[in-house]
Image (tube, rainbow, N blue to C red):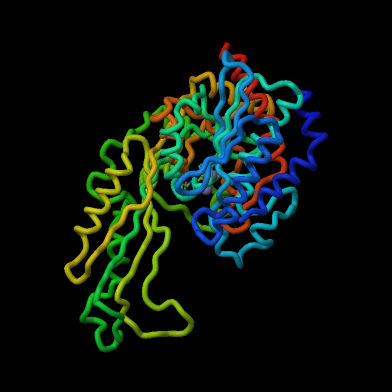
Amino acid sequence: MQIIKEYVEENRQRFLHELFELLRFQSVSADPKYKDEVLKTADFVADKLKNSGANHVEVCPTEGYPIVYGEKIIDSSLPTVLVYGHYDVQPPDPIELWETPPFEPTLRDGKIYARGACDDKGQFYMHVKAFELMVHTNTLPCNIKFMIEGEEEVGSDNLGKFVAQNKERLKADVVLISDTSMISMENPSIETGLRGLAYMEVEVQGPIKDLHSGVYGGAVANPATILCQMIASLHDEHNHITIPGFYDGVINLSEEERKSLNDAPFDLEEYKKELSIDDVWGEAGYSTIERTGIRPTLEVNGIWGGYTGPGAKTVLPAKANAKISMRLVPGQDWRKISELFKNHFESIAPKSVKVKVIAHHGGTPYVTPTNSIAFKAAYKAIKDSFGKEPVPTRGGGSIPIVALFEEELGIKTVLMGFGLDSDSLHSPNEKYDVFNYYKGIETIPLFHKYFAEMSK
Ligand code: BES
Ligand code: MN
Ligand code: MN
């Protein structure tokens, strides 16, 4: 513990400086205009892995963005930890709402503001620096492999193929990921679940062209109105989702499990205040913690159609569109849910319009074991460094590749995230506390230490 603290103390400024360098790359995977920047980020990460002590660092090309791989094998009889993270980030829009530019990391009140500060550059880079620390202080207790990808925010399609084709190379005893949240720094927690995802896009087509709303309005179906009606019908008065078969197979938690989930510290008033809402919303019969952790949901991510420019234009638009996603829980299969959605959405369309539904990416939900050596090692590491026992929670977000690690490689994952839900992931003014960054760098070596010790 002392060695760790000293090394972090001595290298504090450089650790932060390097993260800032990483944050300056505009590695937005969703938008092709950032392509060069994304590629440069991969090279930067590879370079840093090399400098930090990894051997066989490789920028592995894929049909999309490359995967950065690096490893240090010290003894084949020791356990191996596979660290996964992503160097790509979400688009910075709406850019005008950022107080300081998204790709010019800025320190304010002990917080790093930048796109990717928390998700996931700040978090995966803690592992790179913790690794450097272990190599330089001669305390690396196990083998370590890094796999940092550039397409997490767009569904990790090519990583799936890479994993399937590199089973031997990726052999490990556990996957360790910091890409999730804690309740707060005073209430450390470990997420034990990720939700799955089914992402859809719909188009409602009315007349062949935009029409004068005075001449045709009232006599021809307005696709924007119809789309709103269709979307509204996807929830009933209890906010249950109305797609037939949607809840089939959903694994319900026992009363005891639900109670222990709800025992986690959570302040509803604080939650509302922070989001500036007067009330919460959601499926009847479930608490906010349950609604975001163990229940499936359906959200409209975007909706457009017709005239949205300045002033007024009286028009009956030819079409209207929406992007709709569903978060899934264990027992639900995203391919089947996508199919159910498509069939249902087509079936509720009135004859006056034509509907097109396309399925984008999906992801399988995942629940981590809590009785594994790796989970216990993470628990003990956090307890040591925070001075408080972590609470297990269920995360609402998705990291689709995690289920695949288990399916393809047979390896289970530990989610040792240090972010906060209030870090504004995917939102303007994303941040990461400098405190969390260093705390993570100090906690990670403890994980490796305990994992190696307990594996003996
Ligand atoms: N790191 C997040 C997932 C996350 C955030 C998990 C907070 C738990 C708590 C990840 O980068 C992410 O945003 N995933 C996407 C899915 C992807 C297919 C676009 C998501 O959850 O929307
Ligand atoms: Mn992430
Ligand atoms: Mn993300």
Residue 356 vs 415, above or below: the answer is below
Residue, far top: 456
What is the x, y in percent for residue 47? 67, 41
Number of numbered discs on residues: 0
Looking at the image, which is closer to me, 334 or 193? 334
- For this orientation, the residue located farthest to the bottom is 215
Residue 173: x and y in percent read: 51, 22
When the figure is inspected, residue 109 is found, relative to residue 149, above or below; the finding is below
Quadrant housing residue 201: bottom left
Instruction: Tell me the quarter of the image containing the C terminus.
Output: top right
Q: Residue at coordinates 42% horizontally, 58% vertically from top-left?
A: 301
Left/right of residue 406 with respect to residue 173 in the rendered view: left
- In this orientation, which residue lies closer to the viewer: 77 or 8? 77
Residue 148: in sight, yes or no? yes
Seen at 31% across and 61% down, the residue is 202
Res 225 → quadrant: bottom left
**Residue 297: percent from left, percent from top:** 37, 48
Using the image, determine if residue 7 lies above or below residue 455.
below
